[in-house]
Image: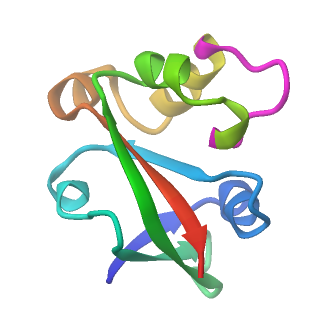
């Protein structure tokens, strides 16, 4: 089982089923996660709370902007009125454009177990 860390807001959004897609760089760790696999999310900052989810779909994108034009922003955890710019800026606060270009983007559709 893969372990990933999540900030409190997205963690709670996934737990409450308001956010169904988790997005990451398609780096070496994420390339090995497939449909049917389980992920243990640990909530930052103390990592004391956790939840297990199952990957029910996996989609690849060249960029966060491309992803934002394909997937519903609400399903990614964004509030009503969010735009592709908002989405791109948010993910660029975690990952650099260089990392995005090098690895590409992967979105995992999740089901809380």
Name the quadrant containing residue 3: bottom left
Q: Write the residue at 25% across / 57% down.
A: 30
Of all residues shown, which one is farthest toward the right?
80
Q: Write the residue at 55% across / 30% down.
A: 71
Q: Main secondary structure of the magenta part?
A: loop
Queried whether the magenta region covers residue 70, the answer comes back as no
Q: Position of residue 76 (x, y in %)?
A: 63, 40
Q: Write the residue at 16% across / 28% down.
A: 102
Q: Write the residue at 77% across / 53% down.
A: 18
Q: Quadrant of the N terminus?
A: bottom left
- The one nearer the camera, 94 or 67, is 67
Q: Position of residue 94 (x, y in %)?
A: 46, 39
In the displayed structure, 107 sits above or below 38; it is above
- The one nearer the camera, 59 or 51, is 59
Queried whether the magenta region covers residue 77, the answer comes back as yes
In the displayed structure, 52 sits above or below 90; it is below
Residues rendered magenta in the picture: 76-84
Q: Is residue 82 left or right of residue 96?
A: right
Colouring method of the image: rainbow
Q: Quadrant of the C terminus?
A: bottom right
In the displayed structure, 67 sits above or below 4; it is above
Q: Is residue 43 left or right of residue 16?
A: left
Counting every numbered tag in the picture gives 0
Q: Position of residue 95 (x, y in %)?
A: 38, 35
The answer to whether one can see residue 9 in this image is yes
Q: Position of residue 68 (x, y in %)?
A: 54, 22
């Amino acid at each position: 089982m893969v372990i990933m860390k999540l900030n409190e807001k997205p963690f709670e959004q996934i737990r409450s089923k308001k956010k169904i897609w988790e997005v990451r760089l398609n780096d070496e760790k994420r390339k090995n996660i497939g449909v049917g696999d389980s992920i243990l999310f640990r909530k930052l900052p103390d990592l004391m709370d956790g939840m297990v989810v199952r990957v029910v779909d996996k989609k690849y994108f060249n960029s966060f902007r491309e992803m934002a034009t394909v997937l519903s922003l609400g399903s990614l955890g964004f509030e009503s009125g969010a735009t592709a710019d908002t989405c791109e800026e948010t993910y660029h606060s975690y990952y650099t454009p260089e990392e995005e270009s090098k690895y590409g983007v992967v979105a995992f559709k999740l089901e809380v177990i």
